[in-house]
């Protein structure tokens, strides 16, 4: 890896070195075009191929059924927090939310601007340390949808199964879990994710939406926020983030060549099991999330002392294990171990944790 560090950032985060090297090789001349993808018209033939292949490969990876659109948009997952209610909370104008972290809360607060967004359950009073399990009768059966956040990036928890709502369709924010484990797209009306964790550079979001759900936004909805704008134009209504889409497409190819989602999931489960296994057996570290709800992507842990946590982060940093600080709102440590974090990075982290434990206990 040369001088590269193991970067445990929650996002933007590590991308596959092979993809970046190949993109660097083609930086000035993309496949004989004499220009960089960054300089390329989004209406050109080469870019048409890039976006079409990116979509086709994402469909393959996630097994996306034909009755779903795939959209490439800007504005991050945060803008999708508004797009979802503006497009989908248009029947009864009610939506139920499982508030399992700060991002879920933000999605709910955004929807509340446009309709009746209700918190069906929240784990906030227990520091979001678990995923509430509800029975179908606890959801409003006339809700337009139930919104969940599959993986809670800040607290390090995740759903391990699709909740049974008894009727209302599910919408999920998959930002920090997409491409890391198998999930069934057809169980959701809409799945969305910001790119900057498992997909590619920041500046791109992906929305997967069932075709019959498009065209329900009110006239007054801003053009860019109407799903139909993007489905009608193949995500080329205005200038898309061409470079991000290109790199995302290269990441998709890279994942397919390595066995796709099932292969990734196997590696991710092994990486996470090693790290949690070590933490649970140690006398110094604790993982606060309920065992059955632990994230595969964001491993949150603490020593119990703020001072020691800070020392940990700073000494790890000096050894090339960087961005291990927890989210600025909760402190402690967080190791984000997305697809592109090599297993060797997790092994090095555990070695460091052992040494730190021996020196500080
Ligand atoms: N949802 C989740 C689960 C996230 O982790 C994040 C960002 N880390 C967001 C939404 C917000 O994403 P963005 O910064 O792309 O708006």
Image (cartoon, grey):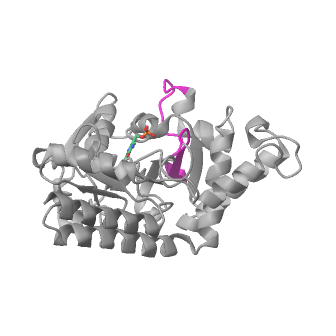
The quadrant where residue 204 appears = top right
Whether 28 is drawn above or below 185: the answer is: above
Q: Is residue 284 visible?
A: yes
Quarter of image, ligand 1: top left
Which image quarter holds the C terminus? bottom left
- Side (left or right) of 24 relative to 293: right
Residue 18's spot in the image, x, y percent? Answer: 64, 60
Whether 236 is drawn above or below 350: the answer is: above
Which image quarter holds the N terminus? bottom right
Whether 40 is drawn above or below 181: the answer is: above
Magenta stretch containing residue 198, yes or no? no
Residue at the spot 53% in from the left edge and 41% down from the top edge? 202
| Residue furthest to the front | 359
Q: Is residue 152 visible?
A: no
Residue at the spot 28% in from the left edge and 55% down from the top edge? 156
Residue at the spot 52% in from the left edge and 32% down from the top edge? 225
What are the residue bounds of the magenta stretch? 202-222
- Side (left or right) of 189 relative to 167: right
Work out whether residue 202 or residue 226 is closer to the camera in this orientation and state it: 202
The quadrant where residue 189 appears = bottom left
Work out whether residue 196 or residue 181 is closer to the camera in this orientation and state it: 196
- Side (left or right) of 57 relative to 125: right
Residue at the spot 33% in from the left edge and 39% down from the top edge? 107
Magenta stretch containing residue 212, yes or no? yes
Work out whether residue 193 or residue 322 is closer to the camera in this orientation and state it: 322
Residue 149's spot in the image, x, y percent? Answer: 33, 51
Whether 354 is drawn above or below 46: the answer is: below
């Amino acid at each position: 890896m040369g001088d590269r560090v193991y970067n445990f950032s929650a996002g933007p985060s590590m991308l596959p070195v092979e993809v970046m090297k190949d993109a660097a090789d083609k930086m000035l001349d993309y496949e004989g075009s004499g220009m960089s993808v960054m300089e390329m018209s989004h209406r050109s033939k080469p870019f048409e191929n890039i976006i079409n292949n990116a979509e086709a490969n994402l469909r393959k990876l996630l097994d996306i059924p034909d009755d779903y659109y795939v959209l490439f948009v800007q504005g991050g997952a945060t803008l999708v927090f508004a797009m979802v209610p503006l497009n989908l909370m248009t029947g009864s104008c009610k939506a139920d939310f499982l508030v399992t972290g700060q991002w879920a809360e933000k999605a709910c607060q955004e929807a509340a601007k446009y309709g009746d967004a209700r918190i069906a359950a929240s784990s906030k009073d227990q520091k979001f340390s678990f995923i509430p399990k509800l029975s179908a009768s606890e959801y409003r059966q006339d809700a337009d949808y139930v919104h969940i956040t599959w993986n809670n990036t800040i607290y390090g928890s995740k759903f391990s199964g699709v909740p049974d709502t008894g009727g209302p369709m599910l919408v999920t924010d998959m930002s920090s879990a997409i491409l890391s484990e198998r999930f069934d797209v057809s169980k959701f009306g809409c799945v969305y994710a910001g790119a900057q964790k498992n997909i590619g550079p920041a500046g791109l979001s992906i929305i997967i939406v069932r075709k019959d759900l498009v065209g329900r936004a009110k006239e007054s909805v801003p053009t860019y926020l109407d799903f139909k704008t993007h489905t009608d134009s193949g995500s080329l209504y205005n200038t898309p983030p061409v470079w991000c889409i290109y790199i995302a497409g290269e990441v998709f190819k890279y994942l397919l060549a390595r066995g796709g989602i099932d292969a990734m999931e196997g590696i991710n489960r092994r990486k996470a099991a090693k790290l949690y296994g070590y933490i649970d057996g140690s006398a110094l570290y604790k993982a606060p999330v309920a065992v059955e709800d632990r994230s595969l992507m964001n491993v949150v842990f603490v020593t119990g002392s703020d001072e020691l946590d800070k020392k940990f982060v700073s000494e790890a940093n000096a050894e090339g294990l960087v961005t291990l600080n927890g989210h600025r709102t909760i402190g402690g440590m967080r190791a984000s171990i997305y697809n592109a974090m090599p297993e060797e990075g997790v092994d090095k982290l555990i070695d460091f944790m052992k040494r730190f434990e021996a020196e500080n206990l």
